[in-house]
Image (cartoon, grey):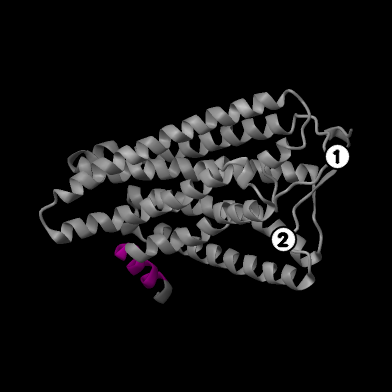
Amino acid sequence: MSNSSYIRQFLLLALADTRQLQLLHFCLLLGISLAALLGNGLIISTVACSHHLHTPMFFFLLNLALSDLGCICTTVPKAMHNSLWHTRSISYSGCAVQVFFFLFFISAEFYLLTFMCYDRYVSICKPLHYGTLLGSRACAHMAAAAWASAFLTALMHTANTFSLPLCHGNALGQFFCEIPQILKLSCSHSIIRELGLIAVSSCLALCYFVFIVFSYVQIFRAVLRIPTEQGRHKAFSTCLPHLAVVYLSVSTGIFSYLKPPPMSTPSLDLTLSVLCSVVPPALNPLIYSLRNQELKAAVWRLMTG
C-alpha cells in the first residue's frame, strides 16, 4: 500500500494505443483548441474594442469567453503533449494545479451563465429597471462574485482531495486529472468529507439550475406577449444562444458525473469528458455568433478594419 507522500506522478488514460491513432487524436485536439482560441479570442477582442458593445450582456459574454479559454488551456495541452510524445505521466503538483484550474474555470462558467440568465430576465421582464438593476457597478460586482466564488470552490475541493492518502496506485482513468478519478485511489475514511463537499456543491448547482429554468419560463411568457414579430425575433435571438450553452454545459456535466455505475465504461467516460470539457469552449463562440447579429457585425468590422 503506497501513501500519497510517495507518489511523485500520476498516469493518465492513453487516448489510443497505436501511434497512428495517437497522432490523429493530437490533430483533432489541436484543431479544437485552435477553434476555441480563435472564437473566444475574437469575442474578447470585439467586445473590448467596440464601445457600443459595452453592455451587461456582452460584458458577461466576455467573461464567459475568458472562462472557456482557461478551461480548454487547462486540460488539452497536456493531452496533446502525451499523445505526441507517447507518454501518460503528469507530476503530482501538476495534477493538483490542473484540478484547481479546471474546477476554477468550470465553476466560474456556471456562475456566469446564471448571471447572464438574470441579465436576460431583467432585460425582457423588467426593462424599465434594467439600468438600475444592472448598472456598470452592479455588473462588476456580479462578475467579481462569480470569479471569487469559483476560486473558493476550486481551492476547497483541491485542498481536500489532495490531503487524502492514496493507496490504490497512481493510474487515473481519464485523460486529465479530475476529482472522481483521484477519489478512486483513496483508501481513507476522509473520502466522506470530500463526498460531502461534492454533495453540497451539487445542491448549490441544482439551485442555480432551478433559478435558470424559472427565469426562462418567465422570459418566454413575456416574449410571447410581445405584439410584433420583429420584437419577438430580437428577444429570441438574444435568449436562445444562452439557453443552448446552458443546456450543452449542464446536460454533458450531469450525464458525465451522475450516470449509473453500470453504464460507466472507459470509452464512454472518455467521450463524455471530451464533450464536457473540450467541446463547449469551442462551440460557445459559434453558438453566440450565429444568432447575434450585433456581435457578428462587430466581429466583421474588427476583422476588416
Residue 134 visible in the snapshot: no
Q: Find disc 2 in the rendering and name its residue.
A: 15
Does 278 sit above or below residue 198? Answer: below
Q: Quadrant of residue 288?
A: bottom left
Q: Where is residue 68 drawn, in percent x and y?
A: 52, 53
Q: Tell how many labels.
A: 2
Residue appearing at x 54%, y 59% in the figure:
279
Q: Hey, which residue is sitting farthest bottom in the picture?
A: 304
Q: Quadrant of residue 43?
A: bottom left
Which range of residues does the magenta coloring cover? 292-302
Q: In terms of depth relative to the viewer, which is nearer, 151 or 274? A: 274
Residues packed near mark 2 inside 10 Å, few (<14), some (14 to 19) or many (20 plus): many
The secondary structure making up most of the magenta span is: helix
Relative placement, left or right, of 164 versus 271 is right
Does 2 sit above or below residue 235? Answer: above
Q: Hey, which residue is sitting farthest front in the picture?
A: 262
Q: Find disc 1 in the rendering and name its residue.
A: 7
Residue 36 visible in the snapshot: yes
